[in-house]
Image (cartoon, rainbow, N blue to C red):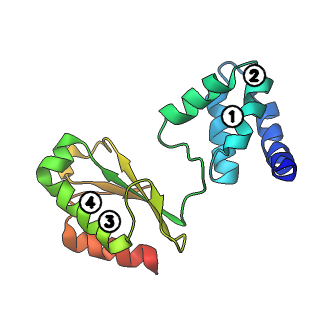
Amino acid sequence: MQQARTEIAAAVEPIIDRWKGEEGPLLPILNGIQRELGHVPRESLPIIAEALNLTRAEVYGVVSFYHDYREKPAGRHVLKLCRAEACQSMGGDAVAEKLQKLLGIRFHETSADGAVTLEPVYCLGLCACAPSAMLDGEVIGRLDEARAEEIAAEVRA
């Protein structure tokens, strides 16, 4: 456990040092850690808290509030499905069920082969093109079950 903490500390301390002198450094630090490691390890929270003179609870509160911060690395592909009302009213629930079945995972899970992580989001701003999704940062509008099959095949390839 000490070795893991040392490795994490070595990875996050330069990021903390880069941002801790700025105004409001917590979010840039968390963004930097996630960008560098692919997630914000729980073991990094006390290191961040100590450096910024915050409590662990304050840091954890921010990490848990923003859904884009992950505690574990994501899959090679990240698929975000909009779960907001507009998308649900246009068939989003059926598409979500289809994708979960095709991928063999539920929301907030990563496939066993590490190919894909499935995440719910609550509005991608594509309400006029509902239902919508985002695959690896690219938005997809007018998602239907046929396109869901294409996406599942693409992330598995």
Q: Compute the Cα span from label 4 to label 3.
A: 6 Å
Q: Is residue 104 above or below residue 82?
A: below
x, y (%) of residue 21? 78, 22
Q: Compute the Cα span from label 1 to label 2.
A: 10 Å
Question: Which residue does the numbered mark 2 point to in the structure image?
Answer: 52
Could you tell me which residue is drawn at 26 percent across and 46 percent down?
126
Label 1: element kind? helix
x, y (%) of residue 55? 69, 21
Q: Compute the Cα span from label 3 to label 2.
A: 40 Å
Could you tell me which residue is drawn at 60 percent across and 53 percent down?
72
Q: Which mark is residue 96?
A: 4
- Badge 1 amino acid: Ile
- Badge 3 amino acid: Gln
Q: Which mark is residue 29?
A: 1
Label 3: element kind? helix
Q: Are marks 3 and 2 in contact (CB under 8 Å)?
A: no
Q: Earlier in the sequence, mark 1 or mark 4?
A: 1
Q: Which mark is residue 100?
A: 3
Crowding at dot 3, Cα within 10 Å, few <14 / some 14-19 / many 20+, comes out as some
Residue 136 appearing in the image: no
Label 4: element kind? helix
Label 2: element kind? helix
Q: Are marks 1 and 4 in contact (CB under 8 Å)?
A: no
Q: Earlier in the sequence, mark 4 or mark 2?
A: 2
Q: Are marks 4 and 2 in contact (CB under 8 Å)?
A: no
